[in-house]
Amino acid sequence: ADVGRLTGRRFDELSRAALDLTRAQYRALACLTHYGEINQACLADLMEVAPISAGRLLDRMEEGGWIVRRPNPADRRERMVSVTEKAEQALHAAREVGDVVTSEALNGFNAEEAEQFIGFLQRARSNLSKPALAQTQAQAQGK
């Protein structure tokens, strides 16, 4: 937990100066880029935040030109969210910031240790994400 908190704080420090993008905004953009256009409720689930919190975040992001929202043609009560070209360009820069943070975090690891450590973390994330992803996909398909 401490490593995640410290990593997030460092990302915030570097990204605010370079991108005018908070960690929460970056997470939202990364989810949208990975999953494509999804509804606000699914995005809130993926980000593990309350729907009202996601709505407020998306309000600020829409005002900033990072995302667009439109009614779902299949269900007008839902709002679909997608990234803008501005966001796609910023994501590249944000990934570079992430690379700097990763490099700082792995300082003192040899190449084999770093590769192994990252592999363990990716596997753990995948294991923990499967149930949440299945639920989110089922909700997105209206099941």
Image: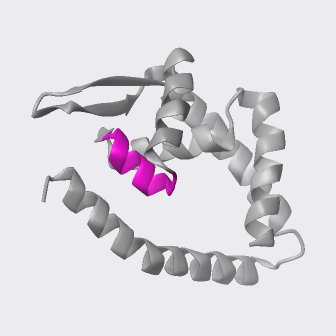
Dominant SS in magenta: helix
| Residue 29 visible | no
> Is-magenta flag for residue 95?
no
**Residue nearest the observer in this picture, 66 or 89:** 66
Would you say residue 44 sits in the magenta stretch?
yes
Q: Is residue 136 above or below residue 94?
A: below
Q: Nearer the viewer, residue 65 or 117?
A: 65
Q: Residue at x 35, y 75 (%)?
A: 131
Please tell me which residue is depicted at 20% across the width and 61% down the height of the picture: 138
- Residue 55 screen position, x and y as percent: 46, 34
- Most extreme residue toward the left is 74
What's the residue at 71%, 53% (across, down)? 99
Left or right of residue 102, residue 71 in this image: left
Give the total number of marks visible in the rendering.
0
- Magenta residue span: 39-49
Residue 104: name its quadrant: bottom right
Of the 4 image quadrants, the one containing the C terminus is bottom left
When the figure is inspected, residue 115 is found, relative to residue 34, above or below; the finding is below
Residue at point 50% right, 53% down? 47
Give the quadrant of the N terminus. Answer: bottom right
Instruction: Give x and y (percent) for residue 10.
Output: 83, 51
Residue 30 position within the rendered picture, expressed as x and y whole percent measured from the top left: 50, 45
